[in-house]
Image (cartoon, grey):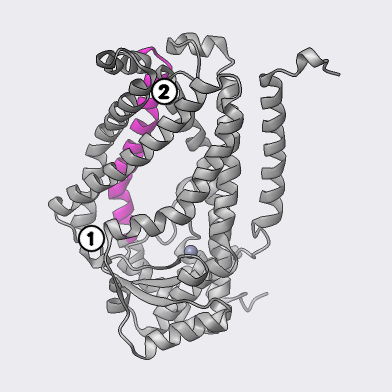
Amino acid sequence: MTGRDGLTPTWWALVALVALGIVLTVAAITLVPWRVPSPTRAERAAALADVPAGVVTRGRALHAALRPSSYGSLLVGLVVPLLLGLTPAGARIVVWVGLPFGGHWLAQALVGGLVIMMMLWLVALPFSAWRHSVLRDYGLSTQDWGGWAADLFKGCAVGAVIGAVVLGGFYTLTQLVPDWWWAFGAVGAAVVVVLLSFVFPVLVEPVFNTFTPMPAGPLRDELRMMAARDGIPVRDVLVADASRRTTGLNAYVSGLGRTRRIVVYDTLLREAPPGEVRSVVAHELGHTRDRDAELAALVGAIVAAAAVVALYLLGQWGALLRRAGVNSIGSPTAMGLVLAAVAVAGLVSGPAQNLVSRRVEARADRHALRLTGDSAEFAAMQLRLAEVNITDVHPPRIEYLLFATHPDTVDRLAAARGPSRSR
Ligand SMILES: [Zn+2]
């Protein structure tokens, strides 16, 4: 047993991390819809035969063209943080930008954070430009370079504001309570995740899109009635002017309780017949009904809290701190090291997050099929999505496991066909 002298902040942090790990495991086992059936190989083969050859080839070609920029941005997103964190480079930059402010920690945190964010953004920039040019070549992006740059700038501004709040808050804590910041930080991180999940979308949506009420008519009535039948009353059905930047088709349900609304892309209304719009909205209602956003926020909050505690424990590793040229992980000069840890953790946990996401999406598909009772419309919509969004309907296994947040088109078509007759 550990004596009273053993009850150090580090010991408590270990206890907290184990407890959060247990909660996360229980949440993952009980709340993720693992039991939604996956199609068999025969069902997938039958579904693939339904996809026109041209759609398969074009999706494959686009994804081959995007691959270098995807892997490139993944690589620089990992290598640059590692260079900043596992060498004294990150610490030197933060110290240097803090000099005009007398080396005050708050200046180091805010200005240093801004400079490092700009660096990460700049190294990723060529890859996003490359990606945009491929999407334009394929007609998937309708945005000219001016609009693209404007979006990029808006994204940067939003990121800088959030970054300043997070960095300012985090380093205020590490300065005020050097031994216990992890406890307050864990609670704070969980709160920030919940806020970002529910408040942020409502605040940020209007920065990027304009929303107008869907004109009165049979489709709007049908969507509202379907939502009501599903036990999810909505206040509004809105149309987003997504065609400003994309030809992609989508819809979503946002807001909570009385502010809940269905948002449909104008591209979807233009491209798809009403029955298919209904099937997309029914999928989104499935997310709302099964509280998938709440599940994501809960899991995200636990993970964020655990990450803060783990970061504190990582800071007990002397050799790592020496490598980064810092005294404490709680110092703004260790920002590069923190970023490196976040980048590695993100890379490692990404496939697990995507696995959970695919299960949740498969459940929403099943919900859509039940709610509309129309598997033909659902399958037609999946084919249209694959064609218009130029989807790789059956991506390479390894990329599917690493990156796919949704079941692939072939899986979704197989779900619509139901169990094959041979069984
Ligand atoms: Zn979905």
- Quick check: 135 above or below 190? below
Question: Is the magenta region chiefly helix, strand or loop?
Answer: helix
Percent position of residue 321, x then y: 50, 12
Q: Residues within 10 Å of mark 2 (few under 14, many from 20)?
A: many
**Residue extending furthest toward the right:** 1
Residue that appears at 33% across and 88% down: 216
**Res. 52 in view:** no
Query: Residues in magenta?
Result: 59-88
Percent position of residue 292, x then y: 56, 60
Between 307 and 204, the one nearer to me in the picture: 204
In the picture, measured across the screen, residue 238 lies left or right of residue 350, that is left
**Res. 121 in view:** yes
Q: Residue beneath label 1, please?
A: 245
Percent position of residue 120, x then y: 31, 31
Between 234 and 130, the one nearer to me in the picture: 234
Image quarter (top left, top right, bottom left or bottom right) of the C terminus? bottom right
Q: Amino acid at mark 1?
A: Arg
Which dot marks residue 189? none
In the picture, measured across the screen, residue 234 lies left or right of residue 384, that is right
Q: Secondary structure at mark 1?
A: loop
Q: Earlier in the sequence, mark 2 or mark 1?
A: 1
Q: Is residue 77 on the magenta stretch?
A: yes
- Quick check: 143 above or below 172? below
Q: Residue beneath label 2, please?
A: 335
Q: Amino acid at mark 2?
A: Met
